[in-house]
């Protein structure tokens, strides 16, 4: 299911971005910035990195200058093709985009100094195997409260009903049990405001919140959500992210 979804997005939009217009409003910081800064802190021109679930590779390629080499893996052929096209445009030579299942990669034990994942898969035991001793893993993940009221309006969605099963403590326990030291772990709640109904509709076509989102069939749901969440700033969507940085003992 997931696989077909990302291939479909790559085919429809040519990248992992729809062009929907929205602004973000933070109260306790921008988790993407925190993730990026912490990744830069653990980077190094002598280091080999692995990006877990690189999608269209835009973020991976923006990080290439901080590392000796980045191996970026994804299981979607469509996304890998977009990433390789972008790589040609950017003339980047130290990133290789490879088709792999993150849960069962073909790389040897201890192949990487740093592994990062930006809303990608998080196979913690495989990550532990692939890291060198003292290596770092950093992820930005989707919190259990993310887009909750939207999913409640639709009556379905990714992680629907998991709201009392907080992701951050679960992730912390999993990594500690595997023998990682937690360097940093925090969560962020913020708002996005979509410029119009059409922008929110477009956004939903390109993300897996509802993998089966259908602009026609979901019209009534979306109209209801838009009616209840329209503000002076735009149509509000509540987001929730987790950022975790760990080090292999
Ligand atoms: C939300 S997107 C990641 C976005 C990307 N990291 C970025 O910064 O824009 C998730 C990606 O993970 C990939 N993916 C999902 N499960 C995977 C798996 N088991 N192995 C490899 N890639 C996977 C999907 O194909 C998709 O491209």
Image: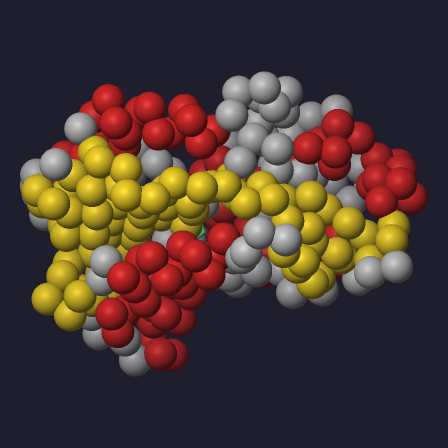
Q: Is residue 152 left or right of residue 86?
A: right
Q: Residue 101, position in %: x, y? A: 29, 38
Q: Is residue 14 left or right of residue 25?
A: left
Image color mode? secondary structure
Q: At x 68% / y 33%, what residue is drawn?
A: 148
Q: Is residue 202 above or below residue 40?
A: above
Q: Is residue 91 left or right of residue 148?
A: left
Q: At x 61% / y 33%, what residue is drawn?
A: 145
Q: Is residue 135 left or right of residue 234?
A: left
Frontmost residue, 110 versus 201: 110
Split into quadrants, the picture shows ligand 1 in the one at: top left
Q: Residue 135, position in %: x, y? A: 15, 47
Q: At x 35% / y 79%, what residue is drawn?
A: 90
Q: Residue 221, position in %: x, y? A: 84, 35
Q: Is residue 143 above or below residue 152?
A: below
**In what quadrant of the picture does the C terminus appear?**
top left
Determine which quarter of the picture holds residue 84.
bottom left
Determine which quarter of the picture holds residue 26.
bottom right
Q: Residue 14, position in %: x, y? A: 52, 62
Frontmost residue, 100 versus 222: 222
In the current view of this chain or complex, which residue is farthest to the right? 227
């Amino acid at each position: 299911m997931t696989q077909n979804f990302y291939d479909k997005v790559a085919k429809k939009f040519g990248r992992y971005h729809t062009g929907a217009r929205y602004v973000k409003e933070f109260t306790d910081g921008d988790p993407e910035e925190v993730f990026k800064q912490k990744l830069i802190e653990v980077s190094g021109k002598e280091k080999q990195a692995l990006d877990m679930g690189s999608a269209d590779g835009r973020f991976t390629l923006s990080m290439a200058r901080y590392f000796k080499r980045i191996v970026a893996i994804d299981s979607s052929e469509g996304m890998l093709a977009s990433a390789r096209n972008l790589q040609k445009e950017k003339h980047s030579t130290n990133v290789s985009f490879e088709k792999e299942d993150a849960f069962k990669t073909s790389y040897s034990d201890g192949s990487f100094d740093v592994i990062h994942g930006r809303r990608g898969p998080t196979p913690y035991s495989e990550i532990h195997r692939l890291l060198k001793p003292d290596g770092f893993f950093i992820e930005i993940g989707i919190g259990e409260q993310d887009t909750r009221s939207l999913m409640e309006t639709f009556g379905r969605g990714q992680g629907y009903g998991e709201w009392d099963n907080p992701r951050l403590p679960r992730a912390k326990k999993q990594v500690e049990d595997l023998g990682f030291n937690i360097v940093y772990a925090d969560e962020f709640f913020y708002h996005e405001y979509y410029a119009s109904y059409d922008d929110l509709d477009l956004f939903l076509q390109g993300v897996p919140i509802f993998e089966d989102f259908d602009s026609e069939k979901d019209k009534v749901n979306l109209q209801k959500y838009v009616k209840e969440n329209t503000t002076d700033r735009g149509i509000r969507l509540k987001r929730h992210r987790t950022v975790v940085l760990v080090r292999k003992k």
